[in-house]
Image (cartoon, rainbow, N blue to C red):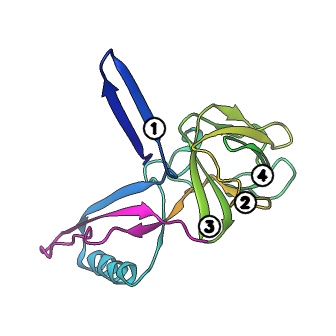
């Protein structure tokens, strides 16, 4: 979500002003849940209403499109060691350009892929990649991202994540719906990114 105000004026002039920090919103739903699965969602709702948060991610794009499928990211880092989708934020060129290391040689990232920059468990920043890029033989890649990384909050050291990249979210009040219909249950809720210090 990017807050904007657009005014259309005489003479075919349009002015748009952007304000605030962009943030993520999500809508989740599941159908044909068993009674046991519905009970788990009911317990999840209780935790969420008592101040619990979730690591919200795009369930349809849990990893880069070049590696889409049911298997989590795996392989060997260019410098050695197992790769599971976690990497290192090597440097920040500017708010929209970051350099990531600790990847497998030739690791491919495409436009629209997600990337998470994590300062700590509850301080995360979720972005989309705007230009295709491939990691060098040393496992280093420069990424162009949207929206800008807040460089006042996200300073080195940080980690970078490509497996289920997420942001911290809070369930929107009153959005949880779990009709009690036997034998199958349907659940849905919405959530909004939460900025934690």
Identity of the residue drawn at 29% across and 80% down:
42
Tell me which label, 4 or 3, sits earlier in the chain: 4
| Front disc: 1 or 4 | 1
Write the start and end of the magenta stretch as one range.
Answer: 169-197
What residue sits right under mark 3 in the picture? 123
What residue sits right under mark 2 in the picture? 159
Q: Is residue 55 left or right of residue 74?
A: left
Horizontal and vertical percent position of residue 54: 47, 70
Could you tell me how far apart the alpha carbons at marks 1 and 3 are, in whole angstroms? 28 Å
> Residue 87, located in which quarter of the rendered image?
bottom right
| Front disc: 3 or 2 | 3
Could you tell me how far apart the alpha carbons at marks 4 and 2 are, in whole angstroms? 17 Å
Q: Nearer the viewer, residue 145 or 33?
A: 145
Q: Quadrant of the C terminus?
A: bottom right
| Front disc: 2 or 1 | 1
Q: Are marks 4 and 2 in contact (CB under 8 Å)?
A: no
Q: Disc number at residue 17?
A: 1
Q: Secondary structure at mark 2?
A: strand
What residue sits right under mark 4 in the picture? 76
| Front disc: 4 or 2 | 2
Could you tell me how far apart the alpha carbons at marks 2 and 1 are, in whole angstroms? 33 Å
């Amino acid at each position: 979500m990017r807050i904007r105000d657009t005014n259309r004026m005489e003479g075919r002039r349009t002015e748009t002003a952007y304000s605030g920090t962009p943030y993520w919103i999500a809508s989740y739903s599941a159908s044909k849940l068993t009674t046991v699965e519905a009970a788990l969602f009911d317990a999840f709702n209780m935790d969420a209403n008592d101040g619990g948060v979730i690591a919200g991610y795009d369930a349809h794009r849990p990893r880069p499109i070049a590696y889409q499928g049911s298997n989590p990211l795996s392989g060997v880092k260019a410098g050695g060691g197992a790769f599971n989708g976690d990497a290192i934020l090597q440097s920040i060129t500017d708010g929209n350009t970051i350099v990531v290391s600790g990847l497998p040689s030739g690791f491919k990232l495409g436009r629209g892929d997600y990337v998470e920059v994590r300062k700590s468990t509850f301080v995360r920043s979720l972005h989309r990649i705007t230009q295709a890029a491939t990691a060098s033989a040393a496992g280093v890649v420069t990424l162009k991202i949207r929206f800008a990384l807040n460089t006042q909050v996200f300073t080195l050291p940080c980690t970078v994540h490509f497996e289920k990249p997420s942001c911290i979210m809070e369930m929107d009040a009153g959005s949880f719906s779990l009709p009690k219909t036997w034998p199958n249950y349907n659940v849905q809720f919405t959530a909004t990114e939460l900025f934690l210090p």
